[in-house]
Amino acid sequence: MKDYHIHIFYSEEDGEYIADIPDLKYCSASGASPEEALREVLVAKDLWLETAGDRGIPIPEPRYRPVIYQASA
């Protein structure tokens, strides 16, 4: 099982939370809460991986890591 980074944010434009997986092109979902967006993107991830496998599309290794800023003292 590959662990992909999931990015969740609130979209003012859409009026809901968006969850996406940067390593899986076009793999995203939305929901009324962060939890709902997460549940939906996990379903989308499973479908993305299944479809890629069925079609012989290479499945990327998890690579994306967010930049974490640390304030210096």
Image: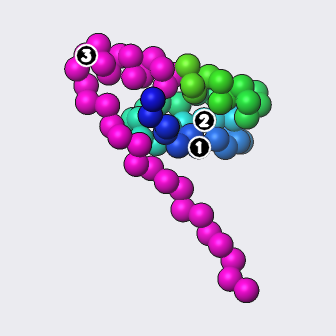
Q: Which mark is residue 7?
A: 1
Part of the protein shown in magenta: 44-73
Q: Residue furthest front?
A: 1
Where residue 66 sits: x, y (%)?
53, 56
Q: CA distance from mark 1 to mark 3?
A: 26 Å
> Circle 2: is it few (<14), some (14-19), or many (20+) Cα within 10 Å?
many
Which quarter of the figure is the C terminus placed in?
bottom right
Q: Is residue 69 magenta?
A: yes
In primary-sequence order, the first of circles 3 and 2 is 2
Q: Secondary structure at mark 3?
A: helix
The residue depicted at 49 percent of the width and 25 percent of the height is: 45
In the image, residue 47 sits, relative to residue 61, either above or below, namely: above
Q: Secondary structure at mark 1?
A: strand
- Residue of label 2: 19
Q: CA distance from mark 3 to mark 2?
A: 24 Å
**Mark 3–mark 2 contact, CB under 8 Å?**
no
- Total numbered labels: 3
Identify the amino acid type marked 3: Arg
Q: Secondary structure at mark 2?
A: strand
In primary-sequence order, the first of circles 1 and 3 is 1
Among the 4 quarters of the image, the one containing residue 39:
top right
**Mark 1–mark 2 contact, CB under 8 Å?**
yes
Identify the amino acid type marked 2: Ala
Where residue 11 sits: x, y (%)?
68, 41
Q: Residue furthest bottom?
A: 73
Viewed as shown, does residue 57 lie left or right of 6?
left
Q: Which mark is residue 55?
A: 3
> Circle 3: is it few (<14), some (14-19), or many (20+) Cα within 10 Å?
few
Where residue 53 sits: x, y (%)?
30, 19
Among the 4 quarters of the image, the one containing residue 58:
top left
